[in-house]
Amino acid sequence: MEDKPDLGNVMAMISFAAVVSTGGFSSAAKLLGYSKAAVSRQIAKLEQNTGVRLLDRTTRSVALTPAGREMYGRCARIVDEVNEANQIITGMVTQPRGDLKVNAPVVASLFDLTSIIPRFLHTYPEVRLLLNLSDSKVDMLKGRFDVAFWMGDPFDSSLESVRLRVYPMVLVAAPDYLERAGRPTSPNDLKDHTCIVETHLSPVGEWRLSDDISVAVNRGPLTSNSVRMAREATLQGLGVSFLPRFLVEDDIGAGRLETLLTDIVTDSIPLHIIFPRGNFALSKVRAFVDFVRSEMVEGNDGGQGATLGLASAI
């Protein structure tokens, strides 16, 4: 079994290094913000734990013993490491720099992220951004990602979130599917249709078409957590899909897909940026969140206007 580190001994070593470097107990106490008696107790503890005398004390000065000189060299390195760590952390908080790990949906290009990120990197050249594209939920709490973009409501209440945009939803199907299956004229008609279910945006088996209308739907040949896969299956005539309009806008305009129940469907889906609590204190995260938020306000609004504001207090 490994020995547990004696954290109290580390503090004693720092106190010892302060006494030597400042030349006395009073000046060391002032440097550390402790009382002179507290520093003296730390040195006595260190000498007791090591079993050797480290300092020769007189009424006017302190001097290192041979063992003390050896100990001081090691303790001074500990103090240097602590100071260096403090400087690094302070830099992380005050100046955007270092690796920033970001997860985004596969369709990130459709909400301008692929153009926003290069502009961010030009603005903050000391940041190195690692972008991962995935439609799945990612583990934000184990440090794999610093921030993530998420379509829909945040999936973990322990995460901070900022809502960036709101996108209208549409019911769509390919013309050849509608020729075979007919066109639904009411929400209840959907129970008689083959539906392509996208599990990221809606609960399996239910579509919320508006604030007061939710319908049960039959699972068709495909259930997926990918909006891009659902779109492709819809284009192939496999059934009806319920998708963000921005994803299929070009398909609708070209006649490859037709919208359904347009007088009923008013639901929308938000785009959030999410991150673990406390990450906003890191300057690289704060700079990225603020930059993306600003860019998305000024850019395309997803069809209903950019909706901003903290979903939970930062």
Image (cartoon, grey):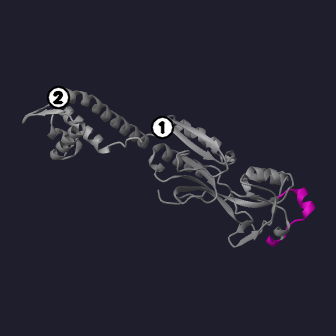
Amino acid, disc 1: Arg
Residue at x 7% of width, y 34% of height: 60
Kind of element beneath mark 2: loop
**Segment tinted magenta in the rendering:** 173-188
| Point 46% across, 51% down: residue | 278
Residue 125 place in picture, x, y as percent: 51, 34
Front in this rendered view, residue 117 or 154: 154
Toward the viewer: 283 or 53? 53
- Closer to the chain start, of discs 2 and 1, is 2
Residue topped by disc 2: 65
Q: Residue furthest right?
A: 180
* Residue placed most toward the observer, 237 or 295: 237
Mark 2 is surrounded, within 10 Å at the Cα level, by few (under 14), some (14 to 19) or many (20 or more) other residues, namely some
Residue tagged 1: 97
Residue in the picture at 23% in, 39% down: 46
Dividing the picture into quadrants, the one containing residue 190 is bottom right
Q: Is residue 116 above or below residue 222?
A: above
- Residue 21 relative to residue 303: left or right: left
Residue at the left extreme, as displayed: 59
**Secondary structure of the residue carrying numbered label 1:** loop
Residue 241 place in picture, x, y as percent = 79, 59
How far across and how far down the image is residue 130, in percent? Answer: 58, 39
What amino acid is at disc 2?
Answer: Thr
Measured as percent of width and height from the top left, residue 251 is found at 81, 51
Give me the residue at 28% from left, 41% from top: 9
Count residues near mark 1 (Cα–Cα under 10 Å), then give few for <14, some for 14-19, many for 20+: many
